[in-house]
Image (cartoon, rainbow, N blue to C red):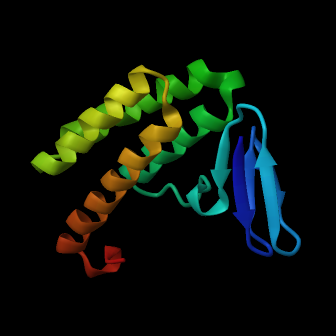
Amino acid sequence: MLRINLRDGEKVVINGAVLRSVGRTDVVIENEAAILRGRDVITPEDADTPAKRLYFACMMAYIDPDRLIQHQSRVLSLFEELLHAIEAPEAKASCIAFANKIARCSFYHALADCRDLIAYEAQALARFSPAYAA
């Protein structure tokens, strides 16, 4: 059993359905489900960097298991591209952790490693252009 507390207007994705709370809401999930809070969801338009595209593909593999093979293929392709571009040891470690979770189809947990890669990417891009600074 999982209890989620949602603020007024907060979104949550449960098995691909986007739900929005009206008022402060408690949701109790009593069986296994793919769940993402709205703050952990990105849109295709927000996936504007290599690490964000990887996050989006991994997120889709998690919340859209009906097209898992298609999403997995996209994740692996994007991961390979990103891995070749990363040089920092801590980012490589996040890549290895991400790859291990993807190999086990643990997409939800892989998203955390991907958030680390997004943060690394933002720092790297900020060094080259102030426009990327968060």
Quarter holding residue 16 = top right
Furthest toward the right, the residue is 22
Q: Quadrant of the N terminus?
A: top right
Question: For this view, does 26 lie left or right of residue 61?
Answer: right
Quarter holding residue 5 = bottom right
Against 131, residue 101 (above or below) is: above
Against 80, residue 14 (above or below) is: below
Against 67, residue 52 (above or below) is: below
Question: For this view, does 103 lie left or right of residue 16?
Answer: left
| Residue 23, image x, y percentages | 86, 75
| Residue 127, image x, y percentages | 17, 72
User: What residue sits 31% from the left and 52% below the top?
Assistant: 117
User: What residue sits 36% from the left and 46% below the top?
Assistant: 113
Against 115, residue 99 (above or below) is: above
Question: For this view, does 13 lie left or right of residue 61?
Answer: right
In front of the other: 112 or 95: 112
User: What residue sits 82% from the left and 56% below the top?
Assistant: 19
In front of the other: 107 or 78: 107
